[in-house]
Amino acid sequence: IRIDSPSSVKLELKWERVKKKVSDFFPYLTLDNYVKSITKDSKQKVSPKILEKGNAKVNEHKAAFYRWQFGSSNFVTLSWVCEPESKIFLLQYTLDEGEDKSSLLPEIVKSVRCHTNESFYPFEIFDVSFEIPKEFHLSKRKLAIGKAELYFLSQDSKILVTWVGLANYQIKKYGFLGKTILNLMSEAVKACDSEFSSLLKTVKPADNFISLEKTNHPLLPILGKATFLSLDAKLDEFSNKIFLVAFKTSSLEKKEVGRKVFASLKGKPRVG
């Protein structure tokens, strides 16, 4: 997650998964390695200056922070481990001239939510919001003006959330929702998993609402588990977008997950 100001990267939040329990010193090690990597990759022939080291609390987790200087830039950088999510986080804030770390740090920290007790995480990308089950992580994304593709994975399931804008123009061009999807969104669906190819073949060009599902059984039980596929798409006139969710799982008790994600999709009102 990154927020830019006119002159610099104002705030950046990164994370990655940790596969085992780590020591209390790991956030400090993460900060040290981060500062070294910035120095190594920079063209500036200067050394970083660590002005202050300390501890903070982020969502009840113990965090380490550095206030440091590199050339003419000043930063506050925090790192912490979120055990419920098995993730190490790093947050960096660029201090503008005159900004005081002591007043800013509590404001920055209280705005961060690295985990939740809810079973679904809220996502908001551009002007679209939706919810994804906690066990999924974002594995790949393609974001462009008027189009987005977000691929999520869990241990036994896959989800694709995708949409295109200017839906009124697209429907006018292709005539029907089914034909629009086959022309503009089918490649993303197949990129999620090749098994969706058979489900896409059942989409009719003249369809104006799509809700399909299929269960694939192996020829022999020894060859693997059955897999469930669902594909849902709709024209949302409120936001002038076409939404699509493709879902695959080998845990048949999760069959409704894709439809719950699809039902949670919301776009902001169209302009014009």
Image (cartoon, rainbow, N blue to C red):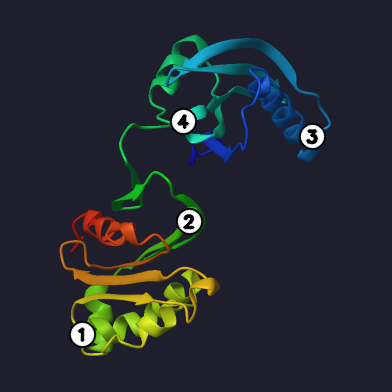
Q: Is the residue under label 2 in contact with that under label 3 (CB below 8 Å)?
A: no
**Which secondary structure, mark 4?**
helix
Q: Are marks 1 and 2 in contact (CB under 8 Å)?
A: no
Rendered position, 205 above or below 53: below
Query: In front here: 244 or 76?
Result: 244
**What amino acid type should be assigned to the residue bearing mark 2?**
Leu
Instruction: State the image quarter where residue 67 is shown.
Output: top right
Label 3 and label 2: CA atoms lie apart by 39 Å
Quadrant for the C terminus in the image? bottom left
Q: Earlier in the sequence, mark 1 or mark 4?
A: 4
Q: Residue at x 79, y 34 (%)?
A: 44
The amino acid type, in three-letter code, at marker 4 is: Pro
Disc 4 packing (10 Å; few <14; some 14–19; many ≥20) = few
Residue 32, quarter of picture: top right
Q: Which residue is mark 2?
A: 153
| Left-right relation of 160 to 22 | left
The residue tagged 3 is 44
| Cα distance in 3D space between marks 1 and 3 | 58 Å
Q: Residue at x 76, y 23 (%)?
A: 48
Foreground tag (3 vs 4): 4
Amino acid type at mark 1: Asp
Labels 3 and 4 touching (C-beta < 8 A): no
Q: Nearer the viewer, residue 33 or 47?
A: 33
Q: Is residue 28 above or below residue 118?
A: above
Q: Earlier in the sequence, mark 3 or mark 2?
A: 3
Q: Disc 2 or 4, which lies upstream in sequence?
A: 4
Label 3 residue SS: loop
Query: Residue 84 bears which disc, if any?
Result: 4
* First of labels 3, 4 by sequence position: 3
Q: Is residue 250 above or below residue 90?
A: below
Residue of label 1: 207
